[in-house]
Image: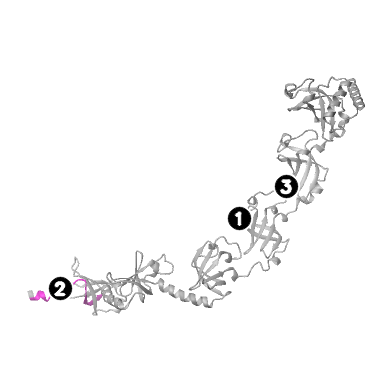
Amino acid sequence: MEELLSQHPIKTLKQETIIPGTVTEIRDHCVKVDIGLKAEGLIPSSEFGDINAISVGEEIEVFLEKLEDKNGIPILSFDKAEQQKNWTLIIENCQEGSVITGRIKSKIKGGLIVNIGVDAFLPVSQIDIQAPRDLDQYIGKTYDFKIVKVNRDRRNVVVSRRELIEEERQLKRQNLLATIKVGDMRRGVVKNIMDYGVFVDLDGLDGLLHITDMSWKRVSHPTEIVSLGEAIDVMVIGIDLDRGRVSLGLKQTKSNPWEDAVQRYPIGSRVKGKVVNVIHYGAFIELEEGVEGLIHVTEMSWTKRIVKPTEVLKVGEEIEAAVLGIDKENQKVSLSLRQLEENPWAMVRHNYPVGAHVHGIIRNVTAYGAFVELEEGIDGMIHVSDISWTKHVVSPSEVLKKGEKIDAVVLDVDTEQQRISLGIKQLKTDPWEQIEMRFPIGKLVKGTVRKVTSYGAFIELEDGIDGLVHISQIGEGRVEKVGSVVKLGEEITARVIRVEHEERRIGLSMKAANYDADELEAEVRTSSKLHSDQEMNSLSDIFNQFEKANASSSQANDQE
């Protein structure tokens, strides 16, 4: 019995060793191998590179991982046997830096497993020039690899495909730089996209395609023209051999649309285009790829004052415009919207001649006047000085209100500046033209206190004419405060003691209301000295005017 036991195969087989075995059956998913034990081992078909290369009855070497599992079946591996045999060859023949062919087996965390006779690790960063996102695309494919690290103690190998690709690219790069010329047409692949342009792989040499050389039209971002991985035809437009840089152009592969733009867009012609950008001073219109025109904000309407171009035009809108000018050298086209319509100001002089009476609605009131809409798009302006002959208007809003309907007279028309000057006071005769006859010096008048100031009171006389009672003319004694003697709205009686025609002023005296001729003469003389810049009537004229005033007053009383 001891002799029989000593001859049993179990005694001669050791775990984790390479032993011979015989193929007894080939199935779809496994291969059955007899190693002389009571049970046969099963090896997955995937461990054999080509399952058709083995046959039943063939003797192969396998790795005995375990004599038997819980079911009494030995655990075998053909792949580990091959790797263990190959490891010695790898150590002897493959040094770091050498090139070897391998097949990618599977994907693990951080990279791929490559079968080069033994399992080698291929990090993600070493698969290609740029680390790929999809590793499954490489499984089952065969490539050349460079051995970058061998750890004999741990029996692991690290390989790189990228280093071989970079070496190949460097060789191609040198050859390309030696032969490439400005003007060459090349086909490349978009490798990287930046805000300022894209890098194109010319099979070993990267060239920069700047955003300004991508298209004759306006480009906001390179992705509007190309996409990552896209194959494109480009032209070499610049070479820097010292830096090893190449500049590329895509738009240069097409004809420049500005070459015959002057002939295609003559001044005065009507064109169609799409609004591609709206800014604070106008809008850019794409007439064709590479040709844009600008409609300045001043060319959007004859009559409306456009503050924001977005009030008129929207991005993406299709419009018609007129060509105002074209600058081929600077690649600019000036366009106009309003030139497509009749200029309403062309007939303004005919429709609103100077002196004509017009009607309108006050559209806006400002600090210096008011704007009156005469018709849609045609406004006239009433300056504050043309509101009243007699009243000193400080703020137009005191007299005029927005939305109010008014009558006015046309004073001036400037079609170039698109301005019409209007006046309200011109609807009436200037009461100051005969002021000396209406208010002769010495005349006794009645009026209402319209305004009280520190230096006197303004009295409203007939026809809205104002006269001023200076503080010195309010009473016989010294008056400290005007408001203590006269009140707003109070009716007072005074005499005219001074008339300044050019300055449109009438001087009144309340204290002279009851003066006789001599007293009046003295008061007028005193007033004349205080206003030496104004020529006064002679004393005899004063008495004559005084008598005429009294006579006129008596005649008026008789008529009543």
Residue 209 point in image, percent of width and height: 54, 67
Callout 3 amino acid:
Gly
Callout 1 amino acid:
Val
Q: How is the image coloured?
A: one colour
Q: Quadrant of residue 253?
A: bottom right
**Which residue is more in the foreground, 256 or 93?**
93
Q: Is residue 436 left or right of residue 134?
A: right
Q: Is residue 12 magenta?
A: yes
Which residue position is annotated with label 1? 315
Q: Secondary structure at mark 3?
A: loop
Q: Residue at x 60, y 62 (%)?
A: 218
- Sooner in the amino-acid sequence: mark 2 or mark 3: 2
Q: Quadrant of residue 386?
A: top right
Where, quadrant-wise, is the C terminus in this rendering?
top right
From where the camera sits, is residue 121 visible? yes
Q: Residue at x 72, y 51 (%)?
A: 302
Up-down relation of residue 377 to residue 294 (above or below): above
Which residue position is annotated with label 2? 10
**Which residue is more in the foreground, 68 or 172?**
172
**Mark identifier at residue 418:** none
Which residue position is annotated with label 3? 377
Residue 438 point in image, percent of width and height: 87, 29
State the extent of the magenta-drawn residues as a range.
3-26
Q: Is residue 542 left or right of residue 99?
A: right
- Sooner in the amino-acid sequence: mark 2 or mark 1: 2
Mark 2 to mark 3 CA distance (whole Å) = 112 Å
Q: Is residue 404 magenta?
A: no
